[in-house]
Amino acid sequence: MKKVLLDLSVLKHINCGLGQVAYNYGVYFSHHTFDDLEITLLLPKKYFGAFGPNVKYIESKEIYTIFPCLIPQFDVWHSIHQLSRFSPSRKATKNILTIHDLNFLYEKEADKIDKYRKKIAKKIERADFITVISNFVKNDVCKNFEIKKSIEVIYNGVEFLTSDGEQKPKSVNDSTPFIFSIGQMFPKKNFHVLLDAMKLLPQFNLYLVGKKTTEYGQMIENRIKGENIKNVFLLGEIEHVEKIWMYNHCEAFVFPSLFEGFGLPIIEAMFFRKPVISSDKTSLREIGANQVEFLEDFSSNEIAQKILLAIEKSKKFPETLDMKFKYASSFSYQKHFEEYLKLYRTI
């Protein structure tokens, strides 16, 4: 029986996208056992036992970042994202490195770019096999790093979402039809382009969900107040059951992001058979395929017209919404993990 360690240390940030990815890894392996693989999870101590008795647990202690040799030996170590502080110390351990994006190249100052580049280059050098979450990321990695080993695209699994247990956020006025978007309030999310567009759509409210205690979030709040925009609201971070309600009850989902390694929210919205309007930047055209209304530019007229067009199409051709659901379902965690299990065994 081969010993496999999954680095789920990012569970300490359970509400972020990577935290949810790690959580779904835990859930999957809590329900599956293997005759040839022993699965161990590296995670915060508060999650010990959370994923049942089918897996073993190791605490993601700070000391292991300084003395990684203290961690027991494993045959395979899967680093589920590129910025974890933990890594295998033994050469005999086969390391699979999953790279989600190189957003730091486009977001950080020059000195920080160099720091991140060196960190990821070191992880790439240590890795025996590299996986990426989209062809866009693969091309970005190959363009910016010298890759002399196998690199494979394995799309993210997307949690199958239903309206079970949904809960309306208290600050949402559900008597007015609304548009929805989600993401941390950072410039790469490009939310500010929606403000002028919403001035052209007074019949709708827009709710933006995600951490808003940032400089960018404050800028958006200041514009809402300064320009007296009455139909745009920043909800901040909300619970998972509240996010489900937002997806389920919105008229459309809009996503003007500039940098995405995958673009999880556009797939999540499709589970609820919602029209999706998105930028076509980085990975979004690849992941959205022919199921999304893509923005030609970020002018207020273009955004407003694409939102209205997407909503009108969904009402005129409701069968297209079933197609979105079917497409979203193709990004199943079952398929995702089948590919990784094959890789664990092969490597």
Image (cartoon, rainbow, N blue to C red):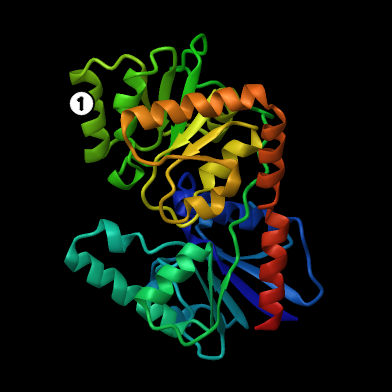
Which residue is nearer to you in this view: 16 or 51?
16
- What residue is drawn where x is 25% and y is 27%? 221
Dot 1 crowding, Cα within 10 Å, few <14, some 14–19, many 20+: few
Residue 11 point in image, percent of width and height: 50, 54
Which quadrant of the rendered structure holds the C terminus?
bottom right
Say if residue 219 shows up in the picture. Answer: yes
Task: Tell how many labels.
Answer: 1
What is the residue that sits farthest to the right in this orientation? 35
Residue 273 point in image, percent of width and height: 65, 32
Image height of 104 relative to 195, above or below: below
Residue 255 point in image, percent of width and height: 44, 39
What is the residue that sits farthest to the top in this orientation? 175
Quarter occupied by residue 248: top right
Q: Is residue 105 left or right of residue 138?
A: left
Which residue is nearer to you in this view: 234 or 206?
206
Which residue is nearer to you in this view: 270 or 334?
270
Q: Is residue 293 left or right of residue 124?
A: right
Image height of 35 relative to 245, above or below: below
- What residue is drawn where x is 53% and y is 35%? 276
* Residue behind mark 1: 222
What is the residue that sits farthest to the bottom in this orientation? 92
Kindly identify the amino acid type of the residue bearing the numbered disc 1: Asn
Which quadrant of the rendered structure holds the N terminus?
bottom right
Q: Is residue 269 left or right of residue 160?
A: left
Which residue is nearer to you in this view: 312 or 265?
312
Say if residue 52 shows up in the picture. Answer: no
- What residue is drawn where x is 65% and y is 45%? 328
Residue 314 point in image, percent of width and height: 62, 27
Element assignment for label 1: helix
- What residue is drawn where x is 53% and y is 42%? 266
Image height of 191 relative to 340, above or below: above
